[in-house]
Image (spheres, helix red, strand yellow):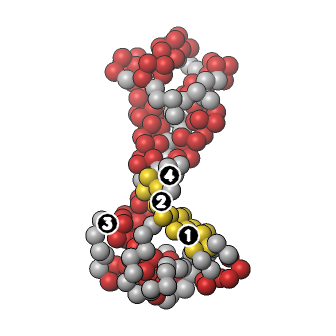
């Protein structure tokens, strides 16, 4: 980015923010990333019109294929949250038979990034030998809160912490839910 930064310094932060966090840059850069030549030229100022070859060369030589190339790729990178989003741990749960309510069998998983391989979250039996659950303030939700925070912290959480997490999140979850490590950390540090 050094040479491009010299030629187009006002765009360096926008490109870095897009790569790091998936924040879409302005119309010109988004069109360049989407490989939409006509739209890029229509949005380009005089300097960027003259630099179009440099933009294409920079993306070809330094860009990652998951970051640019089509509208769909750019949209997915944005939705994933860029490198930060791909590095986050994502947790999700679903009731296997929603009509059974809190008595339903449940599936709780975690993944590195939103599109990673999903792995069953280990149920750490602390209160409920019958399994994890959510949507009420019982022993199953307490074990779910304990198991998520144990995984997130790589250590057993204090009782006050996992009970507060249960009250803040777990008791309110419906048949399906998702939460990220970033959201958990923000809540813990908030």
User: Residue pushed farthest right?
Assistant: 99
**Pointer 3 or 2: first along the chain:** 2
The residue located at (64%, 23%) in the rendering is: 36
**Pointer 1 or 4: first along the chain:** 1
Kind of element beneath mark 1: strand
On screen, residue 32 above or below 177: above
Q: Residue at label 1?
A: 107
Residue 100 place in picture, x, y as percent: 68, 82
Q: Nearer the viewer, mark 3 or mark 2?
A: 2
The residue located at (39%, 81%) in the rendering is: 125
- Locate residue 178 relative to residue 16 in the image: left or right: right
Q: Residue at label 2?
A: 119
Q: Is residue 179 visible?
A: no
Callout 4 crowding tier (Cα within 10 Å): few <14, some 14–19, many ≥20: few
**Pointer 2 or 1: first along the chain:** 1
- Quick check: marks 2 and 4 in contact, CB under 8 Å? yes
What whole-number distance in Å separates the C-alpha atoms at marks 2 and 1?
10 Å
What whole-number distance in Å separates the C-alpha atoms at marks 4 and 3?
20 Å
Q: Is residue 37 visible?
A: yes
On screen, residue 50 above or below 13: above
Kind of element beneath mark 3: helix
Given residues 66 and 102, the one toward you in this image is 102
Residue 68 place in picture, x, y as percent: 54, 29
């Amino acid at each position: 980015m050094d040479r491009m930064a010299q030629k187009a310094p006002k765009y360096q932060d926008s490109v870095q923010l897009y790569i790091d966090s998936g924040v879409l840059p302005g119309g010109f850069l988004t069109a360049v990333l989407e490989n939409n030549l006509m739209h890029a030229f229509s949005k380009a100022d005089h300097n960027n019109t003259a630099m179009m070859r440099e933009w294409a060369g920079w993306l070809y030589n330094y860009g990652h294929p998951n970051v640019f190339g089509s509208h769909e790729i750019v949209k997915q990178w944005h939705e994933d949250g860029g490198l930060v989003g791909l590095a986050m741990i994502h947790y999700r749960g679903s009731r296997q038979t929603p009509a059974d309510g809190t008595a339903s069998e449940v599936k709780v998983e975690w993944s590195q990034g939103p599109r990673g391989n999903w792995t069953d979250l280990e149920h750490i039996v602390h209160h409920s030998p019958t399994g994890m659950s959510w949507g009420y303030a019982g022993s199953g939700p307490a074990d779910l809160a304990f198991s998520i925070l144990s995984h997130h912290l790589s250590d057993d959480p204090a009782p006050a912490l996992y009970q507060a997490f249960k009250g803040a999140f777990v008791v309110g979850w419906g048949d399906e839910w998702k939460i990220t490590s970033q959201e958990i950390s923000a809540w813990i540090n908030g």
